[in-house]
Every structure is written in C-alpha cells, then in structure tokens.
Image (cartoon, rainbow, N blue to C red):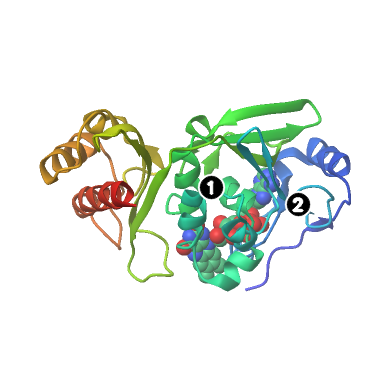
C-alpha cells in the first residue's frame, strides 16, 4: 500500500522544527529513522497531515560525557550508540538485540524511546539505568525520568508540540546483564530482563536495578525483586524467591506469541539468569 497524502517539511534547525510542531501539534508526526513510522504510514495506521523530517536538523545526534553522565542525542543511530565507547554497557548490550543490523543503521535511539513499543529493548535499558529524557518545545525544556516517560504501549509523556532532544544516563553500577527470549533472535522480545548491580566484598548484592519487558504493556521496574535481592548472595533460592516476589502482581499481555502465564514463567527464569550472569561478570 502507499501512504496517505501528507505535507513534508525538513527544517535544518531545531527552532525551525519546534516552530512547525507548535503550529501543527497533533497533525504533525516527526520522522527520525523511519523504521517504525514508515510501516505505519504505508499500512495507513498513521495519517499525519505533516511529516516533520528532522534528519537535516543540526545538533541532534552525538554522544558526550558530562561528570560521568552520558548524553545521547535523540537522532543518534542505534548502531552508533551500540558501538560508541561512551555508551553504558547495558544499553549497548540491549541494542544488540534490537532487530536486524540494517534497521539499527537507520533507526535512532530517540525514535525507539518515542515509539515506545512495549517489546523494545532500549526503553527497558533506559528504565533500568534511570535515564532522563530531555523534551524540548517552543515553551521551553523539561526533563522527564524514564520511570515517568513510558506511559502505555506506544504512549509516552511527549506532548504534541514537544520533541525528544536527548537521553541522559547517569553513571551506573559496575555489573550488568540483558537476557531476552523471542520467537527468533531478530524478532521483538517476548520477554526480557535488564539489570545492573553492584556486589560488596562478601559477594552480596549491595545495589541492584531490574527492568522487565513483557511483564506489562510497557517496560517496568521490578522493585519487589530488587528489594528481595538487596543484601543477598545470588543463590538459586534467593533468586527464585526474588523472581516470584517481583512478578507476583505482574499483568503481562496475552497474545498470539505467548500467554500471560507463560510470560511470567519465562521472566522468572530470565531474571535468575540475568542476575547470576551480572554477578559473575
Ligand atoms: C524489521 C524490523 C525489526 C525491528 N526489530 C526491533 C527489535 O527487535 N527491537 C526494537 O526495539 N525495535 C525493533 N524495530 C524498530 C526499530 O528499532 C525502530 O528504529 C525504532 O522503533 C524507531 O526508531 P526510528 O528512528 O526509526 O523512528 P521513526 O520510525 O522515525 O519514528 C517512530 C516514532 O517516534 C516518533 N519520534 C521519532 N523521533 C522522535 C523525536 N526525536 N521526538 C519525538 N518523537 C519522535 C515518530 O514521530 C514516530 O511516532 C524493528 C523495526 C523493523 C523495521
């Protein structure tokens, strides 16, 4: 199918793009790497009056470090994020699962966050790492923690006149792991666990963050599993109890790929695998 008719604008500056967003609001749709938006257009599931192509806008891509914080421009291609030495290892690891390489060559980190597919790997890593989304509009700039950014499947805190400008990631813990299960390796995740943690001298977990894909209709942290593992050694019993506690109230989707009960069972196993792997790293 062909996309429905739309106006196309490709401003070369951020103020120019924000001006158009302020003018068109809901009727405009930002085009970044196009890897999710173009299929939506040709299937006519998206019908924007204006396609706002930000590929020519200067200053929206690149990776820098500020006092240990990593700042990644929204238009940075996923493959560049994955390969950059500045990228937090957990995010690079998660992106290794994010679809075929040809898609990562064009797809942007900001596009993955803004699209907010509940199966996407980068949003789960961002949530685990307490990333902060920098949103910009003509009204000004606001910082939204990842925990308040992913609201529902394909729904984020980005307002119609706002653009995701940058993803900021504070320094993380020294150990990490990302464990995923899908129908095939390059497919979207059926379930996945991202974790980063620290161990004390006795080998007990002194800090831990865990995020899950497949436990809800958006990426979620598992605070009860985190609490259950804090101060513990990663034994089969503590891992099993933590996974059960963390997923007790979960409401995973049931779909053609897996039932909710199957997703919970898979997540319990992935959680134990990921924490063990991170502890052994
Ligand atoms: C075959 C295939 C397999 C895939 N497999 C995976 C996978 O396994 N895991 C995975 O995570 N993803 C997967 N994807 C999706 C891919 O990662 C997309 O690149 C990503 O979801 C969107 O990034 P994009 O830059 O292409 O954004 P686009 O497609 O251009 O935009 C996506 C949405 O985000 C909005 N948007 C984009 N940038 C901004 C911004 N800066 N500010 C505000 N809104 C913005 C757009 O308006 C649009 O609504 C796959 C895609 C394909 C085609």
Q: Nearer the viewer, residue 81 or 175?
A: 175
Q: Reply above or below: 19 against 140.
A: below
Q: How far across and down, in percent of the image, does residue 79 sit?
A: 61, 63
Q: How far across and down, in percent of the image, does residue 154 sit?
A: 51, 46
Q: In which quarter of the image is ligand 1?
A: bottom right
Report whether 48 appears left or right of 239. Answer: right
Task: Answer whether residue 205 is visible to the viewer in this image.
Answer: yes
Q: Reply above or below: 215 against 95.
A: above
Residue at the extreme left: 237
Q: How far across and down, in percent of the image, does residue 276 sit?
A: 25, 49
Report whether 18 appears left or right of 236. Answer: right
Measuring 43% from the left and 70% from the top, which residue is drawn there? 186
The circle on residue 49 is 2
Q: Which of 48 and 16 is in front in this view?
A: 16
Q: Distance between the residues labelled 2 and 1?
A: 38 Å
Q: Which of marks 2 and 1 is nearer the N terminus?
A: 2
- Label 2's element? loop
The circle on residue 176 is none
Measuring 66% from the left and 59% from the top, which residue is drawn there? 77
Reading the image, the residue beneath label 1 is: 88
């Amino acid at each position: 199918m062909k996309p429905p008719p739309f106006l196309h604008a490709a401003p070369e500056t951020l103020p120019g793009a924000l001006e158009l967003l302020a003018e068109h609001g809901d009727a405009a749709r930002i085009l970044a790497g196009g890897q999710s938006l173009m299929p939506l257009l040709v299937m006519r599931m998206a019908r924007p009056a204006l396609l706002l192509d930000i590929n020519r806008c200067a200053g929206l891509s690149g990776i820098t470090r500020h006092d240990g914080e990593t700042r990644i421009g929204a238009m940075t291609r996923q493959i560049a994020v994955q390969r950059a030495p500045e990228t937090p290892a957990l995010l690079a690891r998660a992106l290794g699962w994010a679809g075929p390489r040809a898609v990562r060559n064009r797809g942007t980190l900001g596009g993955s966050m803004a699209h907010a597919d509940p199966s996407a790997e980068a949003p789960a890593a961002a949530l685990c790492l307490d990333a902060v989304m920098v949103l910009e509009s003509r009204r000004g700039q606001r910082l939204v923690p990842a925990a308040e950014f992913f609201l529902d499947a394909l729904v984020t805190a980005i307002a119609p006149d706002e653009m995701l400008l940058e993803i900021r990631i504070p320094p993380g813990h020294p150990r990490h792991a990302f464990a995923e299960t899908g129908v095939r390796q390059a497919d979207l995740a059926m379930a996945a666990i991202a974790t980063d943690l620290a161990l004390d001298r006795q080998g007990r977990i002194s800090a831990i963050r865990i995020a899950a894909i497949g436990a809800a209709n958006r990426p979620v942290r598992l605070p009860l599993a985190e609490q259950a593992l804090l101060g513990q050694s990663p034994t089969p019993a503590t891992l099993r109890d933590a996974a059960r506690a963390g997923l007790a109230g979960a409401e995973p989707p049931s779909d053609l790929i897996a039932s909710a009960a199957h997703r919970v069972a898979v997540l319990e196993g992935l959680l134990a695998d990921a924490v063990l792997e991170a502890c052994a790293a």
